[in-house]
Amino acid sequence: MSHTASHGHDAHHDHIHLPPPSYWPIFTAMSVGLLLTGVLMWLWEASMSMSAIFIGASLSVFGMMGWCQALIKENADIPNILEDDKWMKMGLKLFLVSEAAIFGAFFGHHYYTRFDFPQWPPVGAPHLDTTLPAIATLILMTSSVTMEYSHHLLKHDKREKSRLWLGITFILGIVFLGFQGHEYGFLKAYDQFTLSSGMFGSHFFAMTGFHGAHVATGIIMMAIVWLRMRLGHYTPERHFSFAAASWYWHFVDVIWIFLFFTIYLF
């Protein structure tokens, strides 16, 4: 009896996978820190802020791709280790919950502030046109459908079609960011509306900008997934990173729907 229990314990212990040491996590964290420092410098109108933003963003992308490459190599050296363990999916779910908590803090502060103000938007705030944001919302919602369809095709071993629809999703994400950048430029040029334009400006640019950063991250994830599909790394049974990118993209889309109603309509 005790021998059987001991054997079962040893088998469970042998199943635990310890990843090899890697410098990519700390490199990526420091790069993101440099990027955020550059953003703060830009807000304070300090010199060299754009250089810090560019270098931080470039190193962050490089770090993410290097980290992904290390994971791909690890998965190739130890087949099925990343696909069979449920802790990968649980880790992704916990990550999305933590992201939802951050956005929840933004929403909580926004609603607390607006109900504390006698008038919202405050006097002097520009009128936010809803036409282009509504079109952008439809584009992002459509991209969620195309992403899910691409995932569906991959699970049915239709890899070429899956890659095509993933590319369409990638393009729709770029178009969405283009709409957002156009709106930012219009508000700054014609309304002198920026992040420093009072409480309303702080809320608008912080919430939509933070979401835009997540959209950009999702686009980078899709680019990596698209490349891996082209290299033949995925099968209908083994494609966790594709599923992770899909879940992340759906999460970003849902958050935007709440943002659209909060910022533009309510």
Image (tube, helix red, strand yellow):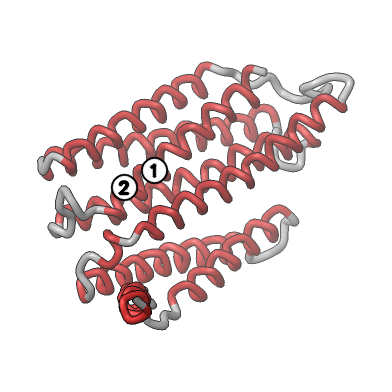
Q: Which residue is mark 2?
A: 243
Q: Decide which of 263, 124 is in the foreground and name it.
A: 263
Q: Quadrant of the N terminus?
A: bottom left
Q: Decide which of 234, 27 is in the foreground and name it.
A: 234
Residue 90 placed where, x, y %?
44, 54
| 125, above or below 5, in the image | above
**What SS does tag 2 mark?**
helix
- Report the side of 223 relative to 132 (left or right): left
Dot 1, crowdedness within 10 Å: few (<14), some or many (≥20)?
Answer: some
| 148, above or below 66, in the image | above
Count numbered badges in the picture: 2
Q: Which residue is mark 1?
A: 247
Residue 173 placed where, x, y %?
38, 38
The part of the image, by quadrant, that contains residue 203 is: top right
Q: Quadrant of the C terminus?
A: top right
- Contact between marks 1 and 2 (CB within 8 A): the answer is yes
Residue 145 placed where, x, y %?
32, 29
Report the residue at 33% width, 61% height from top. Answer: 85
- Report the side of 70 relative to 27 (left or right): left
Q: Which mark is residue 79?
A: none
The amino acid sitting under disc 1 is: Trp
**What SS does tag 1 mark?**
helix
Dot 2, crowdedness within 10 Å: few (<14), some or many (≥20)?
Answer: some
The amino acid sitting under disc 2 is: Ala
Tell me the CA gap for discs 1 and 2.
Answer: 6 Å
The part of the image, by quadrant, that contains residue 151 is: top left
Report the residue at 32% width, 49% height from top. Answer: 222
| 238, above or below 140, in the image | below
Report the residue at 10% width, 40% height from top. Answer: 158
| 52, above or below 246, in the image | below
Asked if residue 17 shows in the view, the reply is no
The part of the image, by quadrant, that contains residue 169 is: top left
